[in-house]
Amino acid sequence: MSRRTSDKLKMPHIFRPLKRASKWPIWADVIARLGVAFFLIAIVILVHWIDRAGLKDSYDGQISFLDVVYFTMISVTTTGFGDIAPVSDRSRLIESIIVTPIRIMVLFIFVGTAYQFALKRTWDKWRMARIQAKLTNHIIVLGFGISGSEAVKELIARGTDPACIVVIDQSASRIAEAEAIGCNVLQGDASNDDTLIDVQIARAQSVLVSAGRDDSSILMVLTVRHLSPKVPISVVIRAQDNELLARQAGANNVINPVSFTGLLLAGSAQGAHVADYMADLASIGGRVQLRERAIAAEEIGRTIDQLASGGRGLRIYRGGKPYGFWEAEAQQLEQGDLLVEVVRCEECEASVPGG
């Protein structure tokens, strides 16, 4: 059992209540709230009518039903002109024990409704419009299924601010899940130009595509590449025959979980700890981690075994071509080289040399 799995087993269970979107339209919700408020007001009118003998009208001395309705409304709304007032001890007790709690509940209903359907919506739209306009150097995740959600969680575990992640999905439940962990979210079709323009695709740091279906994922890659020719795109493809199509569509990295699983299984057949070590490399929860970075200034001219980070260099990329640690090109690092190294997790948190 890997270290990450054992840590998960030790974590205490946290109860998370189920949530389901209301089937009521907004207008029905508003009518229901107003109905409750007027029902409570009707109770107060009835109480005042029954106890009208304890009320005094300074205008004509008579308490009619219209006077009761008038007194109830100015009482509930805390206006209180003073022309009608409770004078008996029983009336004052009723005002204190029955009418005042109802008055507070009615005010909460009115204020809460106004906040939720007017102030809060207006504020949220304004706030998100400001955030949307300033989005830059962010990571866009297209599809928040199993692969997409795990990728987001891993990014956050590696130190990425959730506010720098934008999730696009058509499922309301998945959008709610992404929003709950602090990500920016947009419910819509990720293969639509307008949707991607809304999340500032041209200013994104990278795009992760995991639509769940290869045809949908390739279409999203095509759309992203059309709108942003230089943004790095990683895509999950499940059929090997579609990997070439994904690359032709513009994907920089094509990840096939089926093939990767096959590699792990084949490796574990030849060594009991191969799969466990690969999981360590891929996850922030392991003892070691794969990291890609640019060569630091003090590493120029050194060999791949003489890294300032103390990590183990595995491969360099020079001019877009990969060179292994055993090849001659890796024996003298040059400016502009990209390095893939294995580092201890404690070192992952430290700053990159020269950064």
Image (tube, grey):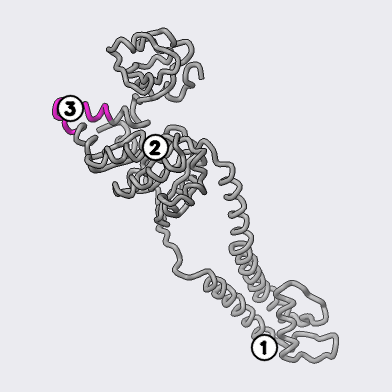
Q: In this view, does 173 lie above or below 345?
A: below
Q: Residue 203 carries which label?
A: none
Magenta residues, start to end: 265-278
Q: Within 10 Å of the Cα at label 2, are there few (<14), some (14-19), or many (20+) other Cα atoms?
A: many
355 vs 43, left or right, is left
Q: Residue at x 42, y 39 (%)?
A: 207
Q: Is residue 268 magenta?
A: yes
Q: Residue 50 carries which label?
A: 1
Quick check: can you spot residue 149?
Answer: no
Left-right relation of 344 to 139: left
Magenta stretch: helix, strand or loop mostly: helix
The amino acid type of the residue labelled 2 equals Ile
**Mark identifier at residue 233:** 2
Q: Which of 266 and 188 is in front in this view?
A: 188
Residue occupying image coordinates x 49% and y 38%: 204
* Secondary structure state at the residue bearing disc 1: helix
Residue to which mark 3 is pinned: 272
Q: Earlier in the sequence, mark 3 or mark 2?
A: 2
Give coordinates of residue 82: x percent, y percent.
Answer: 82, 78
Residue at the image position 37 percent from the left and 9 percent from the top: 332
Left or right: 211 in relation to 1: right
| Distance between the alpha carbons at the discs numbered 3 and 2 | 34 Å
Residue 69 x %, y %: 71, 85
Amino acid type, label 3:
Ala
- Amino acid type, mark 1: Ile
Closer to the observer: label 1 or label 3? 3
- The image quadrant that residue 275 belongs to is top left
Residue farthest to the left, as pictured: 269
